[in-house]
Image (cartoon, rainbow, N blue to C red):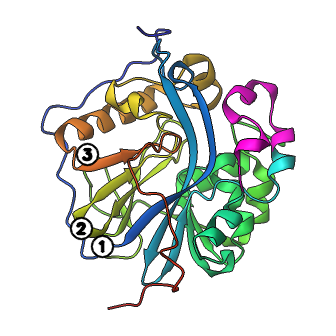
């Protein structure tokens, strides 16, 4: 049962999703969890379900010969100040300080000094996906050009889910990219960061103008598509369905475009289940959590 009549979710024609491209390089991929809360699923998806939703805020760590990459460095050391700045309407989703930890602490626990992280990449500019950039002081930070042109138009301390001050402090490291590569899966274009198919960005517009997904080529042929906040829950892709309408209305800028994106992800799930879709707030067991696999330093190039 739906909670409201949300924007529609059109589905692409059957067979319209391309198989995942073959990657020339496979890399080590794992996730660190910067926040974890236990909620009911109806808070995250437009469905009247009282099943448990373990709400995770994750950052993905990729070990590449060119250097360590962190996708969505969630929280930084300014976390207590950030939570106080967040508006009251966001409290049911954000939770409190007790369930959250800065990215720097999480990385040290798996053998990575934050200054060793060479690259960061953002799925979008929202605070819980980007404020950890301050803890990765030497990283080049990639984000789509559309997102890079959008967030500077925002004024205020906390607006549309963004804390612009954090991004302004990291402005010298923010590096926009274009989707200059061929269509991937069912997406119109792509961007291959390392030129070897290991980390490929695809456009996921709707939640924010330049929201981005990351197709990752893991060892042993494993493939993941990290989708940030396109949906908060895996159920949103599986059903398919938008977020809880009251909360989604505060963060999803273009519900109609978002519905198209969710529909494409749903088709991908049906036609290519070998590509594991990973929402930014619903880790479950879709991707391994990092252990001390990076303690020996960056992977050597072959």
Left or right of 168? Residue 285 is left
The image quadrant of residue 97 is: top right
Q: Which label's residue is closer to the chain start, 3 or 2?
A: 3
SS class, disc 2: helix
Figure check: 86 above or below 297: above
Q: What secondary structure predominates along the stretch shown in magenta?
A: helix
Of the two numbered discs 2 and 1 in the rendering, the one whose residue sits closer to the viewer:
2
Question: In this rendering, would 151 be left or right of 227?
Answer: right
Q: Position of residue 81 (x, y in %)?
A: 87, 48
| Label 2 Cα neighbours within 10 Å, binned few <14 / some 14-19 / many ≥20 | few
Task: Provide residue 183's location: percent of width, then percent of height.
Answer: 26, 55
- Quarter occupied by the N terminus: top left
Q: Which residue is mark 1?
A: 26
* Residue 47 visible, this angle: yes
Residue carrying label 3: 186
Q: Any mark on residue 296, and which? A: none
Q: Disc 2 designates what residue? A: 220
Q: Residues within 10 Å of mark 1 (few under 14, many from 20)?
A: many
Measure the C-alpha gap from mark 2 to mark 1: 8 Å
Residue 124, position in %: x, y? 57, 49
Q: Nearer the viewer, residue 124 or 133?
A: 133
Q: Are marks 2 and 1 in contact (CB under 8 Å)?
A: yes
Q: Which residues are magenta?
A: 83-101
* Mark earlier in primary sequence (1, 3): 1
* Residue at mark 1 to residue at mark 3: CA–CA distance: 22 Å
Quarter of the image holding residue 168? bottom right
Please tell me in which quadrant of the rendered image residue 107 appears: bottom right
């Amino acid at each position: 049962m739906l909670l409201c009549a949300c924007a529609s979710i059109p589905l692409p024609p059957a067979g319209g999703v391309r198989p995942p491209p073959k990657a020339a390089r496979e890399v080590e991929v794992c996730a660190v969890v910067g926040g974890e809360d236990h909620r009911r699923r109806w808070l995250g998806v437009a469905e009247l379900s009282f099943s448990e939703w373990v709400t995770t805020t994750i950052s993905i760590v990729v070990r590449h010969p060119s250097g360590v990459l962190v996708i969505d460095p969630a929280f930084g050391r300014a976390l207590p100040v950030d939570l106080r700045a967040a508006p009251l309407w966001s409290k049911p989703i954000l939770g409190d300080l007790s369930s959250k930890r800065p990215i720097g602490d999480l990385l040290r626990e798996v053998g990575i000094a934050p200054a060793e992280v060479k690259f960061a990449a953002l799925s979008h500019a929202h605070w819980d996906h980007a404020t950890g950039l301050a803890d990765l002081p030497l990283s080049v930070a990639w984000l789509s050009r559309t997102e890079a042109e959008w967030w500077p138009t925002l004024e205020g301390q906390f607006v549309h889910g963004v804390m612009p001050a954090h991004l302004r402090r990291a402005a010298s490291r923010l590096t926009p990219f274009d989707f200059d590569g061929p269509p991937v899966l069912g997406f119109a274009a792509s961007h291959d960061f390392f030129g070897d198919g290991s980390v490929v960005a695809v456009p996921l517009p709707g939640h924010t103008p330049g929201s981005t997904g990351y197709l990752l080529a893991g060892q042993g042929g494993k493939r993941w598509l990290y989708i940030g906040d396109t949906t908060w829950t895996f159920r949103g892709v599986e059903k398919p369905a938008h977020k809880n309408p009251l909360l989604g209305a505060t963060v999803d800028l273009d519900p109609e475009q978002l519905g198209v994106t969710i529909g494409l992800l749903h088709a991908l799930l049906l036609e290519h289940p070998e590509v594991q879709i990973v929402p930014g707030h619903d880790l479950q067991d879709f991707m391994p959590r990092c252990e001390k696999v990076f303690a020996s330093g960056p992977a050597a190039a072959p």
